[in-house]
Image (spheres, helix red, strand yellow):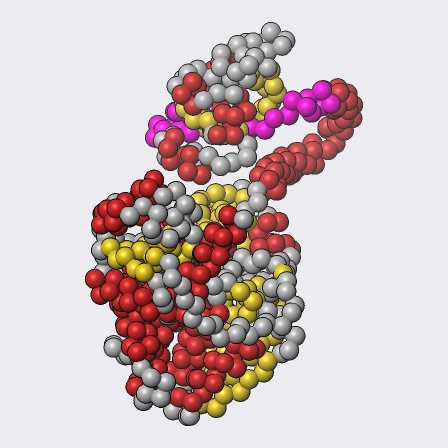
Amino acid sequence: MPPDASPPFPPAENTSISLEDANSIVLILDGQGRVHFLNQFGLEFFGYRSSELFGRPAVGTIIPEKDRTGGDLKVMIDDLLRSPDDYVRQINENLRKDGQRVWVVWSNRAFRDEKGKVCGILCVGNDITDRKAFESFLEQDRVKLTARVQEQNLRLKEANEKLKTEIAQREEIQRELQESRNRYRLLSEASTEGILFHDNGIIIEVNDAFAELVECPHRRLIGMNVIENFVAFEDWERVRDRIDSDDLRAYEIMARSISGRTFPVELRGRAGEFAGRRCRVVSVRDITHRKKTERKLIQSQKMEAVGTLASGIAHDFNNMLAGIQGNVEIVRRQLSDGDPQHKRMDVICQIVERGAKLTGQLLGYARGGQVEVREIDLNRLIEGTLEMFGRTQRQIVIETHKDPDTPNVKGDPTQIEQVLLNLMINAVHAMPEGGQLFIETAPTRLSRNESRIYEIVPGRYAMLSVRDTGKGMDRKTQKQIFEPFFTTKERGEGTGLGLASTYGIVKAHKGYIEVYSEPGEGSQFNVLLPASDNTKAVEVAAEPVVETGTETLMIVDDEPDFLDVGREMLELLGYTVIAAAGSEEAIEQFSSEPGAVRLVILDMIMPGPPIDETIRRLREIDGSIPVLLASGYSQDAEAVRRSLKTCNGFIQKPFRMVSLSRKIREIFEDAQDENR
């Protein structure tokens, strides 16, 4: 191939990789003047679909057969294919599908085969219809001016022939350079992506978008080494391997601005030229927002998958705890006030409560588990938690700073306490030989102007901070600490669910959690929770009392142990109890004594028909029968929320006798209010 020959005619699918997204009309004609390729911009401009146009002659479709002066444009196209060098740049009329004639300025380049024969033409065009009328006027003046200049040149021709030749050559070079700059300017200014031209990594030219991206003035960028100045060190080798590669696929790296800020970008490079100089053209797209969205989606999918497992475990464990709790309540009622066995019953109750908190942690991880949303005073919550925690951690010096202006938050106190406990336990594990633990609260406000790695909702927040003087973490560990089952502890010493459940609870409360750490410098976790609008002090609830009754109740559960315990608990409360071991047995007994049962306590998960079907059949017999739903799942679980629409209340297993007694009386009181 001669040195100045163009490359062979490429397949359209390869050409489209680099030309499809151009904001100009990009057309390829084959050797017979047929449309071989037209980019999306061109298809929309002319009003065609690719299937209507590709393979058809350009004349008669996007080029009229004759222009307005009667000139034969088919002859012009044939001449273009024969002598493409005469048509490097041209302006001619074109035709849209709807018949409208438009003016387009074309820049053409021939593709030649090995023998030098023209096998196709690359045409890049821009619509100048609106300017044509004005250019016509200018053209007349230009012709007149040119004639006068030529007249003067003729007079000076003999004396200045050599000088005129030199000037003409310079003008030609300047014109080509200006055309190249204009084409570049039109393309780069229209692009929102950064575009840079480089020669072996040395910047030749950039657009304004790239200058803004790297926070560096345009004039300073020229001549700089793009890899050493604007690529994060860990990606230097990767970029060097791809800098002159023919691989047109996009790839991702971490870029660096002139101020040192790093951010993810997508690069796509190809061979090109600028002002007649061969170089590489690279598009640079900032993908920071896309990466944030991807991380959020991946984390959400992990939480959902492991959450389903955690929810099932919590449900089954709560059912077992319910049997233990019920038996303790029954035995406690049978003991005299001074019996020393009360102390053992208290120990068992504490164990059950700790087990219930464990399942609450699992449910909090699975669904947020907000079973009791109320006002929380973080300062008071810290005091109560430290009263228990401090006695077991004598080797740790705990310091607190509780800002009295810290606003209340709304949420589940048990879960927020679990967040604090998880963070303190995590801190203690980071200080096996002892150390200092700092716990702090403060009011804060988030705004959209703040630079954070996550999307925020602006507003007032309460901050709960836990800081330790432990061994700290590197960046890689920080990226993984909230993932389910991730732990830095030895096998058997940790589950990897503590911080994962903390993350789930905080997100369920519409909050954020931040971590700051360096190896050897300790760690700090900041939990940001939306502030409540209520500024009143949180009242301490009075100790509830057991409430009794004499009505007839039905309890339905497929677990024999819990069914017996539940029946005895209700009988101790004074009720007449009918026990049923499943839905079918419940329907049979309920229908045998219509009107006798005043309330049905129904387990949500049992073999047989769905819970909604059981409730429907009960109310076909007695339309006003109240139903209290019991389950090891939390009230926030999707299945519970659906069933609650047809029930009168919900109680989560395990429950104490005082909670059960109060829930029953609340339902009866609500029923009385409705009948008044």
For residue 622: magenta? no
Quarter of image, res 327: bottom left
Q: Is residue 585 left or right of residue 60?
A: left
**Residue closer to the observer: 582 or 306:** 582
Image quarter hosting the N terminus: top left
**Residue closer to the observer: 402 or 415:** 415
Residue 97's x, y, as percent?
52, 16
Provide the residue span drawn in magenta: 111-135
Quarter of image, res 552: bottom left
| Residue at position x 29%, y 48% in the image | 593
**Number of numbered discs overlaid on the protein picture:** 0
302 w.r.t. 348: above or below? above
Residue 642 in view of the camera? no
Residue 530 in view of the camera? yes
| Residue at position x 33%, y 65% in the image | 570
Residue 632's x, y, as percent?
32, 61
Residue 498's x, y, as percent?
37, 71
| Residue at position x 64%, y 78% in the image | 404
287 w.r.t. 314: above or below? above
